[in-house]
Image (cartoon, coloured by chain):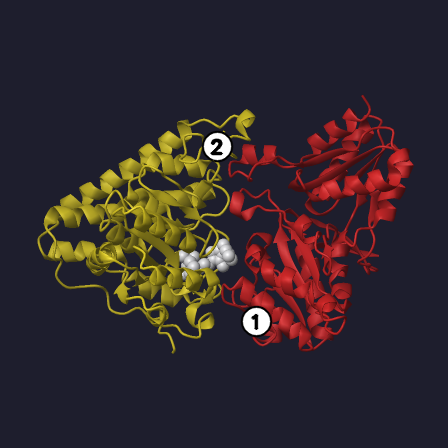
Chain colours: A red, B yellow
């Protein structure tokens, strides 16, 4: 059995369930309460759970993320919502220098069971300061787990294991996914350890995650009409990265295109390509290709923004380039 | 400290300006208002996209404060900066075209509504990171001081910015080094949906500035006379040496952005503040003093509306930046 709902509703349900099931869980962030959540994820929560547990914060990203770390150390299970990845830069020091390091620096004495959620990505004409994709940066940091739910199951299912994890978990929700709708299976339980094949194929592996998954699936349909069967691998978890699934997809298809919205230089796709080189080089029939954002701050005007971002047609072109 | 969200009585009292100057500032507010009313309409029509933060209700602050600056001074603003850009001297056409994303826009479509820039009038943006402009303004002040230039930097920001670390670090630096920076806090009682008393343990912002040994003053931001007079004095003081903090008490009549359901405030509160609207109260004062006739008012308003129509026509007629130029201006060469 399945049931129809949106990505937004799936995240809402997951948070509601967590708040209902565990009194240690609380939600904290800018405008999560009175305003109803910047993206309406927590609309009605203030009335249901009260201001203690649906805690509006001042505009103090460094302060409230740090407070979340302290609350986690002190025995609570905070869900800290940073409005967007763009503003998480103001909290980066606390995430990188405190949350990620505490367990190791204390010789295993202190873990930080904190979940940080944030919206990521471009595509809404919000211009350069509101369109970043920095999940690749976060995936660089040992000590945190980095999740990128792209499907309804993951939007619904990733929060519970993230909260159960004894270490900090950062969840990136792509802004272009919030209104997507689909069928959620009754059994939506998921792990936060493995990549997942979203479309089976044999000719080329399109490896992606997050906001680029729908674009990769659309590209796969176009390619299928032209006789190329693409396998689409959704990485889901950027740290720790499921290398085995990447290698399996490459071993099956012998060609690979890595798609992500980070900039290409030093971006996350480069890490995926490096893993393929290290572990699946002799499986390849062609060089690995990448489709990433152009090396430019994301512009406001729609035609320029579209041109700056990965798109289905660019993925199709990259795949075809591997066969020419 | 509890905060009274109710509007105080509308601004009143004598206007200490001659007719021409008074009418110029009224026209400035009207131009800003008419432009933004049009922007809201164009947003509905899909011509303007992304985030759009309207300044409607707060016009007396930009109009009164910017009129106290000289051409060689610097201005730093936020994403709610359409009025600041216009009144600093940018053409309405360049602003409108930018919001359309056209190549005739001030940033050739790169920035949109939140990122209006103009080197000629020394407007250093249009910053959409809350409190992001304060350290920048502090640095502009440092440059002026070190280069021995007689330049004041006016930095506008909202009440929400006061909670950020950047606010505190900037005020401290500016005061420590006695930099010529005027910190202009546009306190409209809310940062998005969060009322200041739900965000600030100390809601007396002037006390915060004072804690950095910075002179501070609270001003009725709905009263253009109070705004201009206070800013004039503050700018003089800053020119003489050392920063100052002004808190303009104002109110936003519209939603935070075009996506806001306004669940966090009463309609009655908004309506009450509208009775203090900076444009109609100032208009009434000028009329009662014989400094403005109804005909003169209608003429000013008609001119503002014509300017808006021309700006829209300019934006409509504009072209799109070629996609081939996507990578332009990432680096200087
Ligand atoms: C660092 C940062 N955090 C969050 C946001 C999202 N945001 C944009 S405007 C805003 C409210 C700011 O309020 P205030 O400073 O009072 O300015 P106002 O909008 O009232 O003019 C918020 C939370 C942001 N742009 N930057
Ligand atoms: Mg405000």
Q: In this view, does A292 lie to the left or right of B41?
A: right
> Taking B224 as reference, is B264 above or below it?
below
Residue B211 image point, x, y percent: 36, 71
Question: To which residue does mark 1 refer?
Answer: A55
Q: In this view, does B271 lie to the left or right of B284?
A: right
Residue A61 image point, x, y percent: 54, 62
1 or 2: mark nearer the eye: 2
Residue B307 appearing in the image: yes
Q: Quadrant of residue B203?
A: bottom left
Residue at (56, 75) in percent of width and height: A51
Residue A40 appearing in the image: no
Residue A23 image point, x, y percent: 69, 78
User: How far is mark 1 from mark 2, CA to CA?
Assistant: 45 Å
Q: Looking at the image, which residue sits at the far left? A: B290
Residue A45 image point, x, y percent: 61, 69
Q: Looking at the image, which residue sits at the far top? A: A324
Question: To which residue does mark 2 refer?
Answer: B332
Q: Is mark 1 on a helix, strand or loop?
A: strand
Q: In which quarter of the image is residue A46?
A: bottom right
How many marks do you count on the picture? 2
Of the 4 image quadrants, the one containing the N terminus of chain B is bottom left
Chain under numbered label 2: B
Q: Is residue B76 left or right of residue A35?
A: left
């Amino acid at each position: 059995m399945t049931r129809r709902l949106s990505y937004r509703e799936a995240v809402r349900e997951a948070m509601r369930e967590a708040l209902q099931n565990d009194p240690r869980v609380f939600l904290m962030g800018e405008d999560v309460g009175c305003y109803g959540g910047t993206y309406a994820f927590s609309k009605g929560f203030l009335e249901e759970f009260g201001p203690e547990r649906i805690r509006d914060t001042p505009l103090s990203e460094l302060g409230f993320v740090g407070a979340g770390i302290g609350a986690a150390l002190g025995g609570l299970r905070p869900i800290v919502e940073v409005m967007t990845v763009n503003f998480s830069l103001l909290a980066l020091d606390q995430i990188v220098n405190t949350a990620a390091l505490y367990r190791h620096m204390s010789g295993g004495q202190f873990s930080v069971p904190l979940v940080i959620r944030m919206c990521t990505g471009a595509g809404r004409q919000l211009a350069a300061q509101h369109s970043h994709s920095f999940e690749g940066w976060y995936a660089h940091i040992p000590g945190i787990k980095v999740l990128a739910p792209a499907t309804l199951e993951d939007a619904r299912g990733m929060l519970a294991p993230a909260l159960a994890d004894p270490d900090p978990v950062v969840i990136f929700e792509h802004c272009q996914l919030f209104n997507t709708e689909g069928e959620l299976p009754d059994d939506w339980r998921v792990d936060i350890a493995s990549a997942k094949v979203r479309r089976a194929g044999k000719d080329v592996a399109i490896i992606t995650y997050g906001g680029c998954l729908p674009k990769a699936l659309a590209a796969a349909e176009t390619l299928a009409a032209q006789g190329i069967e693409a396998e689409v691998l959704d990485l889901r978890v950027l740290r720790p990265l499921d290398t085995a699934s990447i290698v399996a997809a490459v071993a099956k298809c012998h060609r690979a295109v890595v798609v992500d919205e980070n900039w290409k230089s030093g971006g996350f796709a480069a890490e995926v390509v490096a893993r393929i080189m290290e572990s699946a080089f002799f499986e390849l029939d062609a060089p690995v290709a990448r489709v990433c954002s152009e090396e430019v701050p994301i512009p406001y005007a729609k035609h320029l923004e579209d041109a700056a971002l990965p798109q289905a047609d660019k993925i199709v072109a990259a795949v075809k380039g591997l066969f020419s | 400290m509890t905060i009274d969200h109710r509007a105080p009585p509308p601004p009143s009292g004598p206007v200490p300006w001659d007719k021409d100057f008074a009418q110029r500032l009224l026209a400035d507010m009207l131009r800003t208002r008419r432009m933004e009313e049009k922007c809201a309409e164009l947003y509905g029509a899909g011509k303007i996209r992304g985030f759009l933060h309207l300044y409607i209700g707060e016009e007396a602050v930009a109009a009164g404060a910017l009129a106290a600056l000289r051409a060689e001074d610097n201005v730093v603003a936020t994403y709610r900066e359409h009025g600041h850009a216009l009144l600093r001297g940018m053409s309405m056409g360049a602003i409108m075209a930018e919001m359309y994303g056209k190549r005739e826009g001030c940033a050739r479509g790169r920035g949109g509504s939140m990122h209006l820039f103009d080197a000629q009038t020394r407007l250093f943006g249009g910053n959409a990171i809350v409190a992001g402009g304060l350290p920048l303004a502090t640095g502009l002040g440092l440059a002026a001081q070190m280069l021995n230039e007689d330049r004041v930097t006016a930095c506008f920001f909202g009440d929400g910015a006061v909670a950020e670390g950047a606010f505190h670090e900037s005020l401290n630096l500016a005061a420590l080094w006695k930099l010529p920076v005027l910190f202009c806090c546009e306190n409209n009682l809310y940062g998005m949906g969060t009322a200041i008393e739900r965000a600030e343990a100390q809601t007396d912002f002037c006390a915060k500035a004072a804690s950095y040994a910075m002179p501070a003053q609270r001003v009725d931001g709905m009263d253009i006379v109070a705004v201009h007079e206070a800013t004039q004095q503050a700018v003089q003081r800053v020119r003489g040496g050392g920063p100052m903090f002004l808190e303009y008490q104002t109110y936003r009549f519209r939603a935070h952005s075009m996506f806001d359901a306004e669940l966090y405030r009463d309609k009655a509160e908004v309506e009450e503040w509208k009775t203090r609207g900076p444009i109609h109260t100032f208009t009434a004062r000028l009329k009662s003093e014989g400094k403005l006739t109804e005909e003169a008012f209608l003429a000013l308003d008609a001119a503002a509306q014509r300017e808006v129509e021309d700006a829209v026509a300019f934006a409509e007629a504009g072209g799109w930046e070629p996609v081939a130029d996507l990578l332009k201006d990432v680096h200087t060469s």
